[in-house]
Amino acid sequence: MIGCSGPGSTQETIRLTVVDGYPTQSLWVKEFVEYYIPEVEKRLTAKGNFKIRWNQAWGGQIVKTRNVLPGLQKGLGDIGIVTTVFHQDKVPIQAIAYVTPFVTTDPELVARTVDEIAEKFPEMREAWEKYNQVYLTNMVVLDSYQLFSKEPIEALSDLNGLKINGAGTNLRYLQGLGSAGVAGSLVTYFQNINTGVVDAAMIWPEAAVSFKMHEVAPYMLQADMGTVNSKAITVNKRAWDKLPAEVQEILAETAVDYRDHVAALAVSKGAESLRLFQENGGTIATLSASERDQWAKNMPNIAKEWAEGLEEKGLPGHEILKFYMDTMRTNGQNISRHWDRE
């Protein structure tokens, strides 16, 4: 993976393959290309010892959306963006924000808090190590899940009988509403709604605009289900161990800056996307505060179930859940349900 760049050169060239199954129109991929890679190169140039030749494999060139983690594990890529919601059986602690909906819509707070969990609870990084991965950081790429539908939805009662796409754990948000959850991913939602496989999908506004959801789902219910950490930047451990310490340090520190950069964009683009959705013919209805609270209270306590499941595996589930919720309370979030206090 490391080779001299040529006779007389003072820099060594390191070849890294970066992978994700999502296309470059996805916010996190676009910013990896336009922010992370240039920033790493700038910091390496300042040191003058190494440079990286990037092989960028996006949009399923090497791995599909659900296969980034196994692909990295096998060495099909060196560094990648793992969509953690697809692997909650393997890295369950990553699901903390998914199992605590209706708690926060602050991407920057969630991103920082999840990395604080990684520092405070070594079990989180150890889970990645089982799959030959070195965890660099998590990512929050959305401001809040909302509901985009083919027909208008304005109240909880309108959800009865609908088929709704979700990415995984968030399908459990639909329990008790009379809806049928259908597993999918961002790259399938448009087609699923267009062909009638589902009636709606849980998406965030920036992605809805980027993937032109207004063409098939022109109605949005602003329910503010919450923001989640849905991605992680990891490196194949064998590839990592071959890297010079200087390169490791720059890749890791830049990943955290990239985390904060993307989280800030999720906030700004979320607000801008609401305007663009409407400009493109979309209509937005807002769920009342009382019905939002009712939605949260109608759900089973998926956070408690999650914590208990971790405890059965010898992991500190209840302690992690309390730490997360305490952090949200300390930061004054609009919490509809205190999942850890039941």
Image: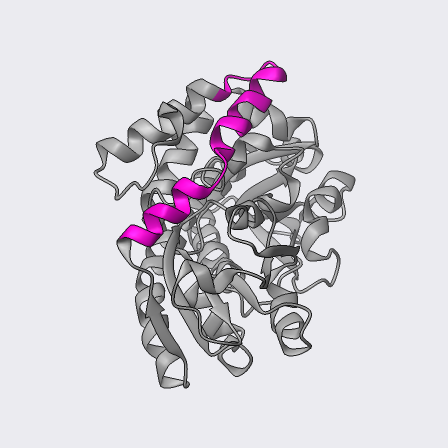
Vertical placement of residue 126 versus 85, above or below: above
- Nearer-the-camera pick, 39 or 65: 65
Residue 145 pos. (x, y %): 44, 56
Q: How is the image coloured?
A: one colour
Residue 87 picture quarter: top right
Q: Residue, x 29% and y 40% (percent of image)?
A: 335
Residue 122's place in the image compared with 235, above or below, is above
Q: Quadrant of the C terminus?
A: top left
On the question of residue 62 being in view, the answer is yes
The location of residue 139, given as percent across then percent down, is: 46, 47
Q: Residue at x 62, y 40 (%)?
A: 235
Of helix, strand and loop, which mostly describes the magenta segment? helix
In the image, 130: left or right of 171? Answer: right
Answer with the quarter of the image where residue 309 lies. top right
How many marks are shown on the rendered structure?
0
- Magenta stretch? 290-317
- Name the residue at 42% across, 66% down: 205
Query: Does the stretch in magenta take in 141?
Result: no
Residue furthest to the top in view is: 314
Q: Residue 313, how many percent across, how many down?
A: 63, 17
Judge whether 84 appears above or below 55 on screen: above
Task: Classify residue 221 as left or right of residue 214.
Answer: left
**In the picture shown, does residue 214 fall above or below 86?**
below
Q: In the picture, which quadrant includes the N terminus?
A: top right
Q: Nearer the viewer, residue 299 or 89?
A: 299
Query: In this orientation, does residue 121 appear?
Result: no
Residue 248, percent across and down? Answer: 53, 36
Residue 292 included in the magenta stretch of the image: yes
